[in-house]
Amino acid sequence: MTEPASVLVVGASAAGLATAEALRRKGYGGELTLLGEEVHPPYDRPPLSKQVLAGTWEPDRAHLRPSEALDARFVLGDPAVALDVPARSVRTASGRELAADAVVIATGVRARTLPGSDDLAGVHVLRTLADSLALRADLVAGRRLVVVGDGVLGAEVAATARGLGLDVTLAGPQRTPLEAQLGLLVGTALADLHADRGVRLRLGAAVTGLTGRDGRVDGVRLDTGEVLPADVVVVALGAVPATEWLHGSGLALDNGVVCDARCQAAEGVHAVGDVARWHHDLLGVPLRLENRTNATEQAALVADNILGAQRVYTPVPYFWTDQFDARIHVHGTPTPDAEATVVEGDLAARRFVAVYRRDDRAVGVLGWNMPKQARQHRQRLLDPILEGRR
């Protein structure tokens, strides 16, 4: 395969920047362009729900500063609106036409919203740096926060806001936070942690809508009929891949940009990061991962493949979350139906390692304030994936 003379990365995100940096690091000397929807240069998203939201970091600290050796053109504040796959050409909202020999799709995801939420002040999602700053301004001025959504982001926002002194309620349909991802054992431990720190839990009930007064939100309505009073509401109901601009392109779109095991969506077109749904050859299933680690690892592989390699992407999935003083590291693919067992440490002390097993096979490892020990168990227990990568 001939090295492409030009590469266009659509999405000036962490994944997009990591792809560009990996290309240069691996010796690519061609033309490199990053196209971004936001006016901001690339930045890290994990701090948005924690350090930036809490005010312990200035917003600039979240920026990912490219090395001087990157030598790339940045086109910011001009989102992509269409892709011509055969021509490998992208049209932007302003009417620009950008073409390259290889295109990398790194447009990420968009936050889900609640119907009617756009009509009320005080209702927020948290995906971008602007979202984080707007939410912080309302939290500083507010007193009562309701977080709609009991997944990772919702729990992190609840913990950060509680640390700022707000009256916080966490609402969602699960019995415990993160139960759909981590099961009841860890979900119960998270519920206890939040309750001990003063977060009110209204779980096991669906949110049916918002109430407002004089154009501003003043409550969250549950399907039980209860209305939770609120000055500020955060909607943290997950995200959807940002693929609307690819409709009509001919690419397969199904919960992301569908790719083969090499993260290729079409000849000369790859996808990376939150938007990419690729086939994991060793697990035998399609995966789409929304986390920072995946963005970096997948970017390195895509850079290799653009330069002529034929590598397949078979990572051990990994993510982390910080809530209050809990630092939780998750390796593999734990699911609610897997049996979780504490194998080291003490659940009551909130310092432990749990192993998830399904069909007599270890499928996941979780460390709660025991990152080193969790990595050690990961090495030993996820042999089917780790051996297949060698």
Image: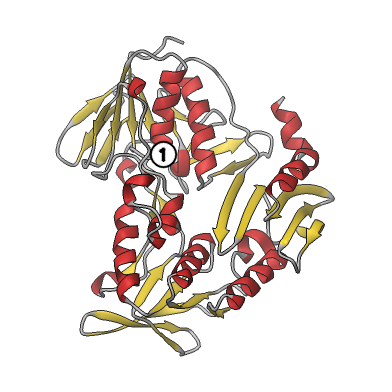
Question: Residue visible at 33% across and 77% down?
Answer: 142
Taking the image as shown, residue 180 lies to the left or right of residue 126, namely right
Give how far across and how far down residue 29 sits, in percent. 36, 13
Q: Residue 141 at what x, y percent from top left? A: 30, 74
Q: How many marks?
A: 1
Closer to the camera in the image, 374 or 171:
374
Q: Secondary structure at mark 1?
A: helix
Using the rendered image of the protein, determine whether residue 249 is visible from the camera's viewpoint: yes
Q: Image quarter for residue 65? A: top left
Q: Residue at x 21, y 42 (%)?
A: 77
Q: Residue at x 25, y 79 (%)?
A: 216
Q: Is residue 195 above or below residue 252?
A: below
In-image side of 334 versus 38 (left or right) = right
Q: Give the colouring mode of the picture.
A: secondary structure
- Image quadrant in which you'd find residue 198: bottom right
Q: Position of residue 202 (x, y in %)?
A: 54, 81
- Identified by mark 1, the residue type is Ala
Q: Which residue is mark 1?
A: 14
